[in-house]
Amino acid sequence: MTPRKPRDPDAITLTDAASMLGLPEVTVTRLRREGLLSRLPGYPSYSRSDVREFIDNPWLNGRQAALVLGVSHNRISQLAADGKIPVHHTKSGKRIYRLREIEAVTAARNLEFHNPVG
């Protein structure tokens, strides 16, 4: 008889992940398929720390990022294309942004605006 593999203390079930996020299980599965949540090998297969990171630093679509940055959706696309703001891509190719990264850009813009160099 082979000994059982110790369970990863960070591992949670799909049901637990959905409960933590306040989302239906089907939505959590979709987020995993898009690469926005990672899957652990075996069962249970979601990482509690990954779900917490998702809650603390959520992914934003272009319109949400535009609201945080105070620019138009088209301007967000231009800034991302020019490499002036951090952008990530889902497995299906959609552009997404991390809230903390967009907030850092906003803070830097405000600092530059209020303390011009020169």
Image (tube, grey):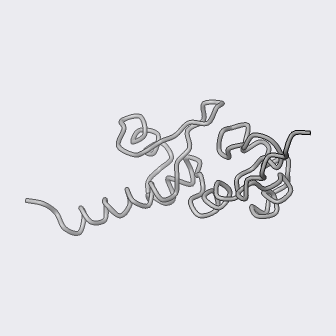
Q: Residue furthest top?
A: 92
Q: Residue 24, percent across and down?
A: 85, 55
Q: Is 70 placed above or below 63 here?
A: below
Q: Position of residue 79 (x, y in %)?
A: 39, 42
Q: At which x and y percent is residue 94? A: 60, 35
Q: Quadrant of residue 104?
A: bottom left
Which one is nearer the viewer's eye here, 111 or 29? 29
Q: Identify the residue shown where x is 70% and y is 53%.
A: 47
Query: At 43% across and 40% down in the image, what residue appears?
Result: 80
In the image, farthest residue toward the left: 118
Name the quarter where the C terminus is drawn: bottom left
Q: Quadrant of residue 92?
A: top right
In-image side of 7 versus 60 (left or right): right
**Which quarter of the rendering shows the N terminus?**
top right
- Front one among 85 and 68: 85
Where 86 sits versus 105, above or below? above
Question: Who's the residue at 64% across and 58% down the image?
Answer: 49
Residue 44: x %, y % from top left: 82, 49
Left or right, 18 with reference to 59? right
- Residue projecting furthest to the front: 1
Relative height, residue 9 to residue 2 (above, below): below
Residue at left offset 23%, top offset 69%: 114
